[in-house]
Image: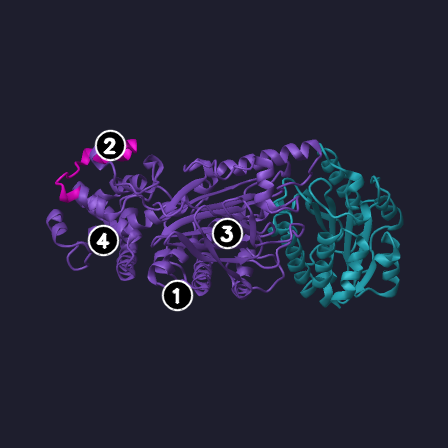
Amino acid sequence: MGFQNKANALHPQIIIFVVDDSGSMQGQKSKTATEAAQDSVITLQSHNLQSHRFRFLLSIAKFGDGVTPLEIAKKPGDVNLQNLVFDGSSGQTNIAASLQWAKQAVEESLQVCRALPDYDEAQSPNPLVVLITDGENTGGDVGAPAQALRSVSFTGGQVDVVVCGVGLEPKDLATAQKIASDPALAANIRSDEIAKFFAAVTITVIKEGNAAGVIDQLAQMR
Amino acid sequence: MATEIWRERLQLDEHLDSPDTLMLFSVLLETARKLEVRLARRFEVKPAPLLHWLHLRHCHPTADDLRQCAVSGQLPERLQGIMVQGSVDPVNGVFVATLRVALQHAPAFGITDPVAIGRVLAFVSQTEWTEEADIRAHNYGLADRYAASAQKILQRKSLSPSIAPATPAPVSPAPQPPRALRPRPEQPYADRIDERGDFLRAGSLQAWFASSRGPAYTRKPDNQDAAYATQSSGSLVFAIADGVSTSTGARYGAAATAFYFTECLADCLKSSAERSPDVLLKAARMAHTVLDSLLETLLAQWTEHDFSEVYADMGRDSAARILENTRAPKRDWPPALASTLIGGYLAPAGASASGHVLRIGDGVVEKLDPFDRCDSVLGMDSTVTEVSTYFGPGPIAAGNLSAAQVVSITLDPGEWLLVSSDGLTRGHSNSVSDQLSARLGRDFLRQLPPTNGAALSPLERAAAAADQAHASGTALDLFGDNLSLVLVTNAGGAA
C-alpha cells in the first residue's frame, strides 16, 4: 500500500504545492510563504542527495485569477529557488483553476515516474497535493475539479489532497474540506503558522509520505 | 647572484632576497599546496636532496634540464634518488607540476636562472617538510605578504595560474589556524590518491589505504568516503571520513576532513612529544578550525568561482544557503561538508607500536593477531544507518567534538589494524575482517603486496562479491555503501 511507504529512488513521491498568490496574500503572508516554500525545497533537495535518481518529484504553482506554473515534475535539485516567489500580485482566488492545474501536474509527474524502467508505483507513497489559500474561492465550483484531482488513477493508492487555509472564514473552511481528500486533511492556520505548515509537510514526506502525518506534525508544532 | 647567496643561507630573508624571488616563492608555495590537496600527496622532493642536486655536486641544471623535466615528467638521471620513498610517479606528481608552473611564471618576475628557480622550489619543499614550526611560519608569513603583489604582476602579464583560481586570503581568519594548513577551497577532488589506493611505510609499520564507490547494485552516484594517511616524525597517521548522505558537499567535505585531520595530527605530532589522547582532540579542534576557515572562504568566493564539487545536485543557490546556515545555523537543514571521522596514529616503539584512535560518528576499528583472531577496538551497530554525530565546519560540529571517542591501541609484530567506514559492516553481523576473510579468502591481508594499487584490491573484490551476492539473492545489502579501508601491519621492527 503506497500510503505508508517512504519515498526512495525506486518509489518516489509526487509532491504538488499550489499556493494562493491573490491580493489578500500581499505583505507578510506572501513573504513568509516565499521563505517557507524555499526552505522546504532546500530540505527536500538535501534529502534527495546521494539518490541515483530522485526521491521526490516536485511541482509548484501560484494562483490568483489564473495559475502560474513555477515548476512542473522537477527533481528537487532542478528546482530554481528564484522562481519560488509569492507577492500577492496574482489577482483574485480562482481555486477551481488551481485544482485543474494540480491534476495536470499529477498526471505529468506520473508520466515521468512511469517512464522509469524500474518504477514501482504500488510501493510508492501516494501523490501529495498541498493547496494553501487564505480566501474565498472566486472561481467556479470546486467540486468537480477537486473530484477529478482525487480521482487520478494511482496504483495501490490515491492522490492525497491537503488544504491549508490561512485564517479562513467558516464557510471557506467548508470549501477547503470539500476539496481535501478527507475533511481531516483541511487545516485552518493562523498567518504566523505558514512556515510551520510548510515544515510539517516537509518533515512528513521525508519521514513517511503519509498525508495525515502533515496534520499530526502541525499539531505537534503548535 | 642567486647561486652565491645560496651558499651562505638556507633561509629566505626579506632583506636579502629580492621581492621578485619572494613573489615567485609565494606563487609556487600556493601552487604546491593546492596540488598536494588535489593529488592527496606531499611535495615529493625534500629540500636537502634538491639542494644537493642544485649546488653541492655542482650539477647545476640548465634551463633545458628543467624544461625537459617539466615536459616529460622524467627526472634527469643525476636527479635519481631525490624523490621521497613511495613517490614513484613523478610525472603526475606535485614536484613536476609545480616545476611547470615555476617555468611558466618565473619570467614574469624577471627570474630566468634555472638555479634560482630551483632554489625557490627548494624553499617550497623546505616549507612543506620542515619539522621546525618557526621556519614554516616564517615562510608562510613571507608567502602571505607577497601573495597580492604576485597576483597583480601575473594578472598584468596575463599569466594567470594554470591549475586553479587564485585564492584570496580568507575573509575573516578563524582562530588558531595551523599555518601550514591554510584551507584551499578549489581542490576538485576529482582525482584522489585514495581512490587509486596508496601504500606507505613508517618505520616497521606498513599501511595501505583506499576508498571506493562500493558495490554497483547500490547505485551510489559517487564516493562520499575518503581515506588518507601520511607519516610524521616516524609515526603513521591515518583517517577515514564518510560524508553524511544528506549533507551538501559531502564528498568534498569528507575529502577535506580526512586530509586536514591527518595533516593537523601530523603537525601536532611534529611539534610536540605529547602522545596522549589529547593530541587527537587537539588535532580534531585544529581540523575543525581549518574547515571553518574553508567554509568562510567558500562563501566569500561563491559568486566568483563555480564550486560544482560542493553544490553538486543541490543547485548553487540552495547550496549557498546551506553553507551559510552551517556557519550560522538558523534553520533545521542538514549541515554542509559533514562527515564522520575515524582517525589516529601509531608510533613505533621498539618492536611494538602504540597510538590512539579517535572516532566521531560511526566506522569500525579492529585488531587482528598473527592468527587472524579479531579484537573489536571500536565497533558499531551495522543496522543503524543514521549517524548520531558528525564532524565538519560550523558551531554545531564544534559541539560534536565533545562526543569524540578516543581509544588506545598497540600493534605488536605480526598484528594488523583494520580501520573501516561503515560500508563494510553493512549486510552482515560479523566483524569486518571475518566477513572479508570469508569473501576474499583467509589470507587476503597477507597477500597484499607493498604497492600503491594493491590497497584498492580488497575493496574492489569486496564490492564484486557483494554484487554477486546481491544478484544471487543470498545477501541483498552486503557492503551496501561506499567503502574505505586503512590497513596497517607491524612488520616486526624491520624498517
Answer with mark 1 or mark 3, whichever residue precedes in sequence. 1
Q: Residue at the spot x=70%, y=46% of the render?
A: A58
Residue under label 3: B253
Q: To which chain does the residue with label 2 belong?
A: B
The three-letter amino acid code for the residue at tag 3 is Gly
Residue under label 4: B22
Q: Residue at the spot x=64%, y=57% of the render?
A: A39
Answer with mark 3 or mark 2, whichever residue precedes in sequence. 2
The three-letter amino acid code for the residue at tag 1 is Gln
* Left or right of B485, for residue A92: right
Q: To which chain does the residue with label 3 belong?
A: B
Both labels 2 and 1 in a single chain: yes
Q: Quadrant of the C terminus of chain B?
A: top left
* Total marks placed: 4
Q: Can the viewer see residue B160 in this picture? A: yes
Foreground pick, B398 / B151: B398
* Left or right of B218, for residue B400: left
Residue B57 within the segment the image draws in magenta: yes
The hue in which chain B appears in the rendered picture of the protein: purple
Answer with mark 3 or mark 4, whichever residue precedes in sequence. 4
Q: Secondary structure at mark 2?
A: helix
The three-letter amino acid code for the residue at tag 2 is Gln
Front: mark 3 or 4: 3
Residue under label 1: B176
Q: Secondary structure at mark 1?
A: loop
Q: Is residue A18 above or below residue B223?
A: below
Single out the residue that lies furthest toward the front: B371
Q: Is residue B461 above or below residue A147?
A: above
Q: Which residues are magenta?
A: B54-76
* Circle on res. B68: 2
Q: Quadrant of residue B268?
A: bottom left
